[in-house]
Image (cartoon, rainbow, N blue to C red):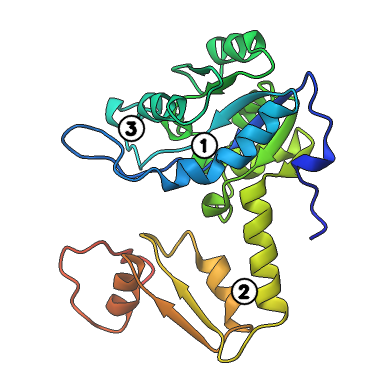
Amino acid sequence: MDKKTIKDVDWQGKTALVRVDFNVPQDKATGAITDDARIRAALPTIQYLLDHGAAVVLMSHLGRPKDGPDPKYSMKVTADHLATLITAPVKFVGQTTGPEAEAAASALRPGEVLVLENTRFDKRETKNDAAMAAELAKLGDVYVNDAFGSAHRAHASTEGVARHLPAVAGFLMEKELAFLGSALENPVRPFVAILGGAKISDKIGVISNLLTKVDVILIGGGMANTFLAARGTNVGKSLCEHDLA
């Protein structure tokens, strides 16, 4: 893989701005995390950065907040959980950008971690707003993308910010890209792609790209309802993007 990774950077004294995928499931009643696999998947990248003298600022979305900040989607619970998985100090700031976030990032010392508030609390995130991307870039020296599960979205914290900082891949991103590259370049036939998730609109580009490379695409999850509706099936109140059907 030609993309630079965190191993290509001298991290001593630098702040790593890391996009992780901490969109983890939570108990609806208590808010407790019910599966921390995505958090654990990011640990090798986080630990490497800490071990090599970096301060680490983490950003992620959680859920789909509709009207701005919503306590049930706060990253505070995730930050507290991360603190139980690593020995480094983990801090939390209740903002994603702005003076409070900038002050928290500036005060961060090598070997410490700062978790930003949910990127989607700012409505500019999903619009890939250039101003938000520039504000995020103030929080670090190098951008690290380790959120493979969100890499298909052109959002301010995934694509926009990379225009303002040197950008490298984390270990999880590197591993997934290497696997995907190998699978696409020299596939075993028949080559089957299985896609899931809630929204097909997020993945149209991925599907179009795969059409010429795979033998079969299997669609599952909520996005399957949109395909069923397009074929005339009554999906009732099930999740469906009727404007695409």
Q: Which kind of residue does numbered mark 3 sit on?
A: Tyr
Question: Mark 2 vs mark 1: which is more N-terminal?
Answer: 1
Report the number of discs: 3
The residue that label 1 is drawn on is 125
The percent coordinates of residue 47 (x first, y second) are 63, 33
| Displayed quadrant of residue 34 | top left
The residue that label 2 is drawn on is 209
Q: How far apart, in angstroms, are the residues tagged by discs 2 and 1?
A: 25 Å
Which residue shows up at 42% across the image and 80% down it? 218
Q: Are marks 1 and 3 in contact (CB under 8 Å)?
A: no
- Element at badge 3? helix
Which residue of the protein is positioned furthest toward the front in this rendering? 87
235 sits left or right of 198 in the view: left
Camera-side residue of 231 and 194: 194
The residue that label 3 is drawn on is 73
Q: Quadrant of the C terminus?
A: bottom left
**Between tags 1 and 3, which lies in front?**
3
